[in-house]
Amino acid sequence: MAVLELSGVFKSFRTHLSIRRIQVLRDLSLSVQQGEIFGFIGTNGAGKTTTIKLALSFIFPDRGAVRLFGEDASRTALRRRIGYLPENPYFYDYLTGEEFLDFHARLFGLGVSLRRHRVRELLDRVGLGKRGDRQLRTYSKGMLQRIGLAQALVNDPELVILDEPMSGLDPIGRREVRDIILDLKARGRTVFFSTHILSDTEMICDRVGILVRGSLKAVGTIDDLLAGGDVPFWEVTLRGAPEDRLPCGRVVSRRLDQLLIRVDTQADVHRLLASLDGTASVISVVPARQSLEDLFIRESRHD
Amino acid sequence: MIERVGAIALNTFREAIRNRILYLLLVFAVTMITFAQVLSLLTVGSEEKIIKDFGLASIDVFGVLTAVFIGIGLVSREIERRTVYTILAKPIHRFEFVLGKFAGLALTLLVNTAVMAAWFFLVLLLKGMFDPRLGLAILLLVFQFLLVTAIAVLFSCLSTPILSSVLTLALYVVGHLLWSFDLLQRRLHSVAATAVCQTLYYLLPNLGNFDIKGEVVHGLAIEPSRIAWAAAYLLLYGAAILAAACAAFERKELQ
């Protein structure tokens, strides 16, 4: 079942005092399935946050439909099943971590004892167990991101929407967020997150969507998306080969008697290997596998 | 619904009481009430009237300033600082958010006025000048604060904090001078001009309804119907303003 679904969505904004409208999303259709981790990637200004704001009805589409759990996304009651972390979250800095989480739990009408239990559990889960009694103004950026994540999980949501959850975090913080996302999936939850940090996406996402200037350029599993691309070149490592008699390829580096040679086509790889005599040995032949980053850059340039 | 509005209200109250501006205004008000005694020595006229008049005026001005300076930032600052997003991503209607903000500020003003009134009464008791009718005058001031708060919340839903504060203060001033529209209308001969004056007279908030300071200070009679009318005016006008604020916020794009 589609947990989040956008079909044919257009969205434009008017800039300050100008009559001209800027088209942010163009005919965006997207569907996030139950139980998957969906990575929504795109450059700054591609329309990721706009898409998320549409899903939460902070803004409304010019055209098209946004649905959550098969129903119109603007229905307030649906938000009982959603958790959301905004990009660069700003919170009430006069509240302590505990007060902040308690306040958000109250909005779900949770009782006092359940709230107290949930707040404690969440603080531990995001690694802020001992800092809950401190005002948010004393928190570091990483801590704010974690308390933000905790408020997104306060209702044990079925769908968690995270806007740039990794931005501004150090490698340890990123790994912690990654682990929380994977833990949510293990609990059967659906996670939809936007990011421009591709290495994280590649590691944890079941599917990704690539958004370029308001249009979805590619969507699918990482394997499917990457398999579709050609291998752009091969790297052949040889030992004891005579550099001046190579039939093709370009020597990229030399170390002792080893040569690393970049070869452009598979036919050239065969030619190169056939040309070797008994004194040379082959160490490795590696096709340069396309990374998500390559795909992302290629899709962004195509436009 | 009550629970969600209550949660927002409580949080708004908490924010206000942790705001330094509130204490600054409160200290000023208390100082002014105390200063009235010195002032009464320097001016010609009854000492008692000057102390009472000055005290009530201080509560009036500082209450309104609190309503404006805290009220105007209530909604727009939440959008500006993006704190509104985590709240509206929860199962809460937008009108509940607006009502909660209003209720929180109303609670702040009640506490604020109670502190100012307590100090005022203490000063008067010590001087043997206490008059229970002053409580009535303060009650009507609270009505006025609530209406000004509703107006501040409405502007806060529509525009930026600075513009909201200017507009709210302007309406407060105009609201106290509304009798002049009535006067002007009687002196104008053009039908169109009279119609404009009359429309403005009925459309703009008539804060004169909440002002019985003169009667209380000078010991004049106050009809109970005057208090009832002030309460009814607050309920009707205040409800209309809050409804407009909720409607404005309902379809607002939170970019």
Image (spheres, rainbow, N blue to C red):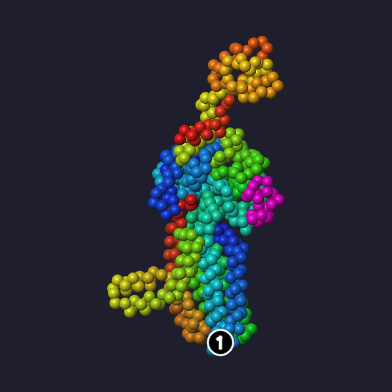
Badge 1 density bin: few <14, some 14–19, many ≥20, Cα 10 Å: few
- In this view, the residue farthest toward the top is A278
Q: Position of residue A230 (x, y in %)?
A: 52, 24
Q: Quadrant of the C terminus of chain A?
A: top left
| Main SS, magenta residues | loop
Residue stretch rendered in magenta on the structure: A126-144
Q: Is residue B227 magenta?
A: no
Q: Is residue A77 above or below residue A219?
A: below
Q: Is residue A134 magenta?
A: yes
Q: Based on the displayed image, in which of its 4 quarters is residue B125 positioned?
A: bottom right
Q: Position of residue B243 (x, y in %)?
A: 44, 61
Residue at horizontal 47 percent and vertical 63 percent from the top: B163
* Residue A180 showing in the rendered view: no
Residue at horizontal 47 percent and vertical 82 percent from the top: B222
Residue at horizontal 51 percent and vertical 59 percent from the top: B75
Residue picked out by circle 1 = B43
Q: Position of residue A187 (x, y in %)?
A: 61, 39
Residue at horizontal 59 percent and vertical 54 percent from the top: A91
Q: Based on the displayed image, in which of its 4 quarters is residue A81 positioned?
A: top right
Viewer-closest of A43 and B103: A43
Chain letter, disc 1 residue: B
Viewer-closest of A31 and A197: A197
Residue type, numbered disc 1: Thr
Q: Position of residue B26 (x, y in %)?
A: 60, 71
